Amino acid sequence: MDKHKRLIVVLFVIAVLALLFGCATPSRVVTRTSPDTQTDLSGRWNDTDARIVAEEMIHDVLSRPWLQRFERNALRRPVVIVGDVRNMSSEHIDTSPFIRSMERELINNGTVRFVAGDAVREKIRQERLEQQVHADEATAARLGAETGADFMLQGSIVSMTDAVDGTRAVTYIINLDLIDIETTEIVWIGNTEIKKIIELQRYSW
Amino acid sequence: MNRKLSAVKALKLVLLVLVVITVSACITPTRNELFSDIDRGAYRGDFEIALKQLEIEREELYTDRDGVLYHLDMGMLTHAAGEYQRSIRHFSEAEMLIEDYYTRSVSQAAASLLLNDTQLNYYGEDFEDIYLNVFNALNFIALGDNDSAFVEVRRIDQKLRLLDDKYNELAQGYSRSEHIGGAGIQAGTSQFHNSALARYISLVLHRSRYLDDGVRVDWGYLQQAFAAQGQLYPFPLPLDEKTVIRSNKPRLSVLAFAGRSPLKLANTLWINTYEDFVQIVAVSEQESVGRILDNYSILYFPGVEEGYRFKFELPSMVLRDTEVTGVRVKVDGSVVGELSLLEDMQRIAREAFQAKQQLIFLKTVTRAIAKGFASEAAVGALDKAGSASGSDFGAFMAALIGLITRSAVDLSEQADLRVSRFFPAQAYVGEWELPSGTYSVALEYLSGNRVIYTERFSEVHIAPGKPNLVWAFNPR
């Protein structure tokens, strides 16, 4: 019977502990923070990665000789169109935020001009055609007056994952190529790598 | 005379215990009983109805520890209903939860030692973690987003590689232990570490992009799945080298899913002790009829003490019968051939369960015995307190609380019957070279010579550089 009592006490203590820790779920806490704050919650690709890639690529693309060479030869700023940036990683990554960041930075510092990509361009062309019928002739956009792009920016995101039970090392390799549309010459290759080690705890309360 | 008194007392207790059993059996429907209407809807192919019902009854069907299951079930039903975007959301959510639940909760583990295994988060089986990506890849293909389908395929590859490493590590461990005389550890190891179905979808996608290396690697893994997991693939490889040879003509690839994944059913055993007697009641659950009494016996067992009561409830996995014996493919009204079995998904599910069965058994028995002793001690203490009170009311209250204590202990002991319910049981495959063009394709599900279901695709555009993959699901 003593054994039984001891067993009951042990079980009771476990039950109380389970109850205490099991019920101690934290309520949701929301804290506002600067968009520049580095956040790493799940270990997946996030806004911090997109920002790092954009910053590194902008710095790289502006420091290479293709820009001065083009300006010297053409006596104007280059016009760039964004092509496909393919996600070849093992995560569903939206590539548009860092491409958008690059576009913004390059337009705002006046080094490069961008023309709209194919999806937007189709809509604009449709609108321009409709203007020829419906808009005042004086205000209708002219046909055949689009700015032709000199270069196309395209690239890919590849990820490599090495994992063992509970730990994962992920390397994202971001490649961007700037291709001369007339000659198909690749004038710039940008490459950035981001490596993360994600360790999952085996136990928690 | 004493024996007679004991017999009368025992009979009274038998009646009392039977009342408790009946009450507890009635007021705690098993997980499967709760799902019976939804299961029937899904079986008939009324996926939209099953979906609506599942959403309405979500609170009753899933606890906050069953998020993975909810999203797996919703993911599969929405896929079957053709709601691919929703299916993607649910499967992705399930995948994230599975990763989150890698971290096991100690408090939940403690609660599971005291109450039952349903106190633990359902963190998904390996096969569920793979199949969610398989169906998500199909979701993306259906939406024409092949880049995203590739993402799913890469995730599958990562997971399978991890499983392969884990499996090989375990296998090496076992071989070492056998070397030094260790025995009997092999039971409890899941052999599943490669999925021919997953590899095939990867192959089709690689082939659509002319990624010959990828095709070759997938083909190698697909063959390995059959060769290294003979117990999971005890049937011939349904594809041959033609699958990997680049051809001038595009290939129509066909997948047909049939049947429903297996269920876990509860088997319950009560052992009650009386002075010199042991009573045994065995109740089992059947999918169609619910709980039925399997065995009831009273054994004369001299020397046994009165008052112990043990309830053991263990899950067993049963395969759900499928009427489908084959799938015939028609292109533009003409039969081009039959599909062959590529993956027996239900077999993989059952194997995963069997790998854990020994552990579940040990844990359940230990817990049930501990609970039996604990409740006996508590009821004994209550009886003493009741007698010490000297009043009839006190004695009555003590007996009542004792009864409630036993019922509560009874109710708390439950088998963990959680498993995803709407994945198919089998996957069939077939391929045909066709000139580029638009075709009508029909998949006829056969039961013997009888066509029991036909899925028609009126306009299938077959062209190079596309997966050219069609698939259907019939749960019958």
Image: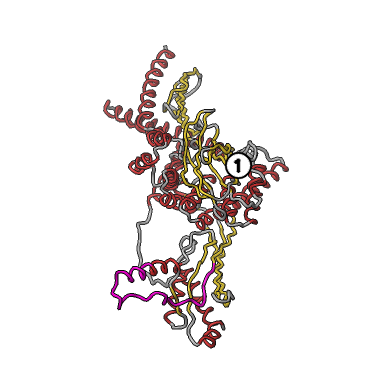
- Chain of the residue under label 1: B
Q: Nearer the viewer, residue B150 or B382?
A: B150
As drawn, B15 above or below A51: above
As drawn, A152 above or below A86: below
Asked if residue B103 can be seen in this view, the reply is no
SS for callout 1: loop
Region of the chain picked out in magenta, as a range: A126-155
Tell me residue B231's x, y (percent).
63, 37
Quadrant for the N terminus of chain B, please.
top left
Q: Would residue A143 be counted in the magenta stretch?
A: yes
Tell me residue B186's x, y (percent).
64, 40
Residue, disc 1:
B189
Tell me residue B64's x, y (percent).
39, 47
As drawn, B181 above or below A117: above
Q: Three-letter amino acid code at disc 1? A: Thr
As drawn, B349 above or below A171: above
A99 displayed left or right of B381: right
Q: Nearer the viewer, residue A164 or A21?
A: A164
